[in-house]
Amino acid sequence: MPAYFLQETLKYADICCALNKYLMHSWLSIPSESDFSLQNLPYGVFHLGDGRLRAGMAIGDHIIDLAAASELGLFGKKRFFYKIFTQSTLNDFIALGKPVTNRVRKKVQDWLRLEQRPDNAAQILVNRAEAQMVMPIRVPNYTDFYSSIEHATNVGKMFRPDNPLLPNWRWLPVGYHGRASSIVVSGTPIRRPHGQILPPGGAPDTPVFAASRQLDFELEMAFIIGKESPLGTPITVEQADEYIFGLVIFNDWSARDIQRWEYVPLGPFLGKNFGSSISPWIVPLEALKPHRVKSPKQQPEPLPYLATKGLQNYDIHLEVSLLHGDQSTVISRSNTRYLYWSMAQQLAHHTVNGCNVQVGDMMASGTISGPTPGSFGSLLELSWGGKHEIALSDGTVRKFLEDGDTLRMRAWAGAADRKVGFGQVEGTVLPAHDTAG
Ligand code: MN
């Protein structure tokens, strides 16, 4: 290797090292394992028990109170930003567009990187443990995709053993329009639903009305639209990043027995719309840039409007735990990199016919299963349609969720000191109302 090249490389390495130190340094102590590093700065809406809602950004064990920060002039235009950050949702802020939202993000990052703890720190910082998180956005429309080839194949095998993947699956990101009104924030309990169910051993094609016995979760990620598009104008795969504000973890609670009886011919309905839970912190797409990876190879090659180049997928670790009493068992570990169809392809396909999108629209990935049984993203797959039992650390077993079970999902990209994490989404199963029958 020529000497000058070696020298240049060393210099480059020095600069990178210094830059890294600068990027990671803050006067605020941020636990090294925290999901909320300086590189992350996700947005949420919280209150301190008084119901006064305000926007915040998570950093380590703290929250930056964005309303307080605007009052102190951190972003300029004090009254404008104070009004924006005391809304009950982030929709108006997100709608300002990425030049504004990224400038706010940069201002907060710069403030956290000051040489010394600033005098206004006490007014701007809130202890995260004291805050109650609420639904961060108003969701006008919700779409759920079906973009994991492992999940689609597993489910297909159970319902159609000889023909698991339908012929359209590799040509388009399959999806359906879901229900936005029942999307709730992490911590909201989920009531076991009633519905029409075919009883095992009952008369053929004759349902009973009963509480679901096959309550399940679906491990998904969802992206949130940050920019409106006009009706009649498709969004291309190249434009997709402009329209995607950020991501959350998404649990698409599902009642398999209700779903199985109702889903033909028009797809999911009451087996799905009784509740979906999201993590409270929205991780901006910008924070995930360093964690972009290649998508799985697509065969056949997608049609031109779905053709993409470069790194379209994300390396986000996913973990599902089932909590029962004081015991917790990790039942699945997956990763968003397994998704066959990328978010850009989902959005391009969703709008290729001219369908418009609105700020706050939520588009979920579909269950993210990996290639091995330990990476399956639903109990339907983990128990293989109720054939196997899943052992929990307290000695009990599960095929589907029981009353009192708490399901928790976590997601994070990157390693210690620079993690871009999502925190968690969890929900506890409440017994069905006993009034129905
Ligand atoms: Mn789903």
Image (cartoon, helix red, strand yellow):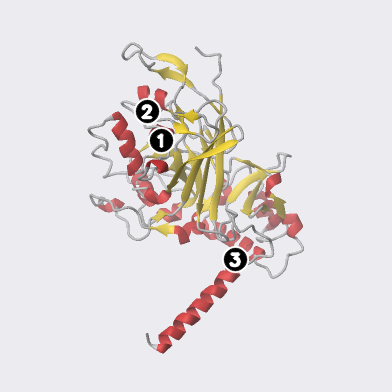
The residues bearing labels 3 and 1 have C-alpha atoms spaced at a distance of: 39 Å
Q: Is residue 354 visible?
A: no
Q: Which mark is residue 24?
A: 3
Amino acid type assigned to the residue bearing label 1 in the image: Leu
Quadrant assignment for ligand 1:
top left
The image shows residue 131 at horizontal and vertical percentages of: 68, 44
The image shows residue 135 at horizontal and vertical percentages of: 59, 40
Q: Residue furthest front?
A: 395
Q: Earlier in the sequence, mark 2 or mark 1?
A: 1
Residue at point 32% right, 56% down? 308
Query: Looking at this view, is 232 or 287 the one in front?
Result: 287
Q: Which mark is residue 181?
A: none
The image shows residue 136 at horizontal and vertical percentages of: 58, 43
User: What secondary structure is found at the residue carrying circle 1?
Assistant: helix
Residue 246 appears left or right of 373: right
Query: Looking at this view, is 329 or 146 the one in front?
Result: 329
Residue at point 51% right, 48% down? 411
Estimate how packed mark 2 is, as few (under 14), some (14 to 19) or many (20 or more) residues with alpha carbons within 10 Å: few
Amino acid type assigned to the residue bearing label 3 in the image: Met
- Asked if labels 1 and 3 touch by Cβ distance under 8 angstroms, the answer is no
Q: Residue beneath label 1, please? A: 382
- Asked if labels 2 and 3 touch by Cβ distance under 8 angstroms, the answer is no
Specify the quadrant that holds the N terminus.
bottom left
Query: Which-is-in-front pick, marks 3 and 2?
Result: 2
Query: Which-is-in-front pick, marks 3 and 1?
Result: 1
Amino acid type assigned to the residue bearing label 2 in the image: Lys
User: What secondary structure is found at the residue carrying circle 2?
Assistant: loop
Q: Earlier in the sequence, mark 3 or mark 2?
A: 3
Query: Looking at this view, is 293 or 98 the one in front?
Result: 293
The residues bearing labels 2 and 1 have C-alpha atoms spaced at a distance of: 9 Å
Q: Residue beneath label 2, please? A: 387
